[in-house]
Image: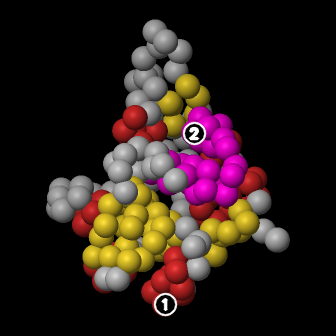
Amino acid sequence: PEPICQYDFTRVLYDYRECRLLKDAESVPQGYKTMADSGTIPCAIIPILNYYGLSTNLSHLGKILVENGYRTENDGTRWIAIDKIPELVYGIRTQIQSSVFELCESVLSELPVLAIVPASWLHNLESMPSNECITAWRIEGNKVIVTTTSSHSPRKLDLIEFLRNIKRAWAFQPMK
């Protein structure tokens, strides 16, 4: 699936108070955030939904996250949203990956795996304090093919380095 780059969505308000598409002449209200600022989780979930033939738009998913309290004032989107929203709203079961072996088995079974990694590692910039969601789609030898929420193109990462830098990961599959 085609990655969704969060930096393309400066016109989607994504704040703990509301989520919506800004009108043409409207600017971002003072103190509010957009998907470009903090939309890594919703931008990572959309391609997984698309992979399973489900379509939704980013502002609709963001609105669900905001209305259900998953978007926080200071800490971005709560990770628990990855467990709950795909399953409860879209019928896509999520499973936290308890080991690197389970993660590799999921990817080799053609299940997309969303992982949270330090943005500083992913972009090789120590000054980046946040996390980024990336989705592992394939393993090819000692490389993993991923999409990120900061790029329009898939990337090949060293598999061992990828596994070392995962903070948490989830596999996705349709419920039976």
Q: Residue placed farthest to the right in the image? A: 176
The foreground one among 67 and 49 is 49
Of residues 172 and 70, which is closer to you in this image? Answer: 172
Task: Count all numbered tags in the image, as a single digit.
Answer: 2
Main structural element of the magenta stretch: helix, strand or loop?
Answer: helix
Residue that appears at 42% across and 17% down: 27
Q: Is residue 15 left or right of residue 129?
A: right
Q: Amino acid at mark 2?
A: Leu
Residue underneath mark 2: 58
Magenta region: 38-63
Q: Quick check: 138 above or below 24?
A: below
Seen at 18% across and 62% down, the residue is: 124
Quadrant containing the C terminus in the rendered view: bottom right
Q: Quadrant of residue 157?
A: bottom left
Q: Secondary structure at mark 2?
A: helix
* Magenta stretch encompasses residue 62: yes
- Disc marking residue 101: 1
| Picture quadrant where residue 119 is located | bottom left
Judge the density around disc 1: few (<14), some (14-19), many (≥20) Cα neighbours within 10 Å: few
92 sits to left or right of 114? right
Task: Please state the horizontal and vertical placement of residue 13, each as a whole percent of the image.
Answer: 50, 31
Please determine whether, in this image, residue 92 is positioned above or below residue 77. below
Q: Residue at x 54, y 58 (%)?
A: 78
Kindly give the residue lying farthest to the front in the view shown: 140
Which comes sooner in the sequence, label 2 or label 1?
2
Residue 70 in view of the camera: no
Residue 147 screen position, x and y as percent: 41, 58
> Which residue shows up at 55% across the image and 68% down it?
112
- For residue 85, above or below residue 68: below
